[in-house]
Amino acid sequence: MNKSLKCIASAVLLVVVTFFSRSAFADSEVYTVAMEPTFPPFEMLDSKTGKITGFDVDLIKAIAKDQGFEVEINALGFDGLIPAVLTGKLDMSISGFTITDKRAKVINFSDPYIDAGIGVMKRSDDDSIQTLDDLKDKTAVVQIGSSGQKVAEDLKESGKLKAVVVMDNVALAVADLIKGRADVVINDVTVNVAYAKGSNGAIEMLKTPLNKEEYGIVISKNNPELLEKVNKGLANIRANGTYDIIFAKYFKAK
């Protein structure tokens, strides 16, 4: 096939592919969504398929399904996500964005979809720990380099915690807790929930977190209609149990 025929064939193929790609969304509105896929389990690249997967992906797809629209998922560096929404290159972004007053001055956040604060896990049979005030004579085990380590060391420095033991990962920290080598684990609330749910009642969380951070979906202030759809969809999937299914998929410990 000569060059001109190749060009014509390529052009025809592009039209056909574009037609069929768009025809899949013909009956519903399509919104562009981006995230940085380096934040498991919220978003990560599947090494086998090359597609972005994770809690945030399943969540936004469930919201879209509930509200009758489609989403086109893209990858983008974290620093570029909010600017892309502000300039209209993206309709929204969901990528573990902590809701802050500073960000809220320039963009809209959806209602919070997850609590990402730092919390405390203890053995369920340890009645000596009921509140955060009970930690002052206790030993906490934490994951190295984590936010939980920073919070625990601050507590120790201020006399609100006796000692801090640092482990390579959360699984080792939880193992130390269950075996009685430490009194509590201090770590992200979302991960604590997963381990507590998978412990067959061996460990539980204190009700009061050490701090509170919430994640929200980023949407332009120029698109209040989309914000309303997202919030309505989020409320609906929480009410009908879809949210709980997605949460268990990514945070329930093995």
Image: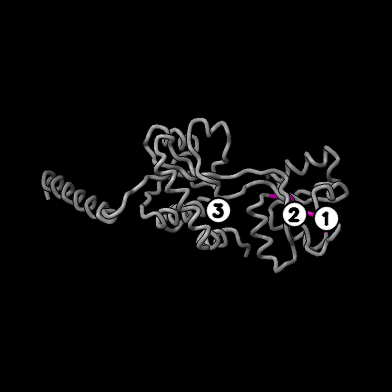
Q: Is residue 139 left or right of residue 203?
A: right
Other-residue count near label 3 (Cα within 10 Å), few / some / many at <14 / 14–19 / ≥20? some
Place of residue 248 in the rendered image (x, y in percent of width and height, measured from the top left): 57, 62
Q: Nearer the viewer, residue 220 or 143?
A: 220
Residue occupied by mark 1 = 129
User: Of marks 1 and 2, which one's residue comes earlier in the chain?
Assistant: 1
Residue 20 image-quadrant placement: bottom left
Q: Is residue 229 above or below residue 106?
A: below
User: Of marks 3 and 2, which one's residue comes earlier in the chain?
Assistant: 3
2 falls in the magenta region: no
Q: Residue at x 38, y 50 (%)?
A: 71
User: Of marks 1 and 3, which one's residue comes earlier in the chain?
Assistant: 3
Place of residue 189 in the rendered image (x, y in percent of width and height, measured from the top left): 66, 51
Q: Quadrant of the C terminus?
A: bottom right
Q: Do residues under tags 1 and 2 come within 8 Å of each other at their CB atoms? A: yes
Give the residue type that dot 2 points to. Answer: Leu
Residue occupied by mark 2 = 206
Residue occupied by mark 3 = 41
Q: In this picture, which residue range is highlighted in magenta? A: 181-187
Q: Is residue 209 left or right of residue 66?
A: right
Q: Nearer the viewer, mark 1 or mark 3?
A: 1
Q: Which mark is residue 146?
A: none
Q: Nearer the viewer, mark 3 or mark 2?
A: 2
- Please say which color scheme the image uses: one colour
Q: Secondary structure at mark 1?
A: loop
Q: Secondary structure at mark 3?
A: loop
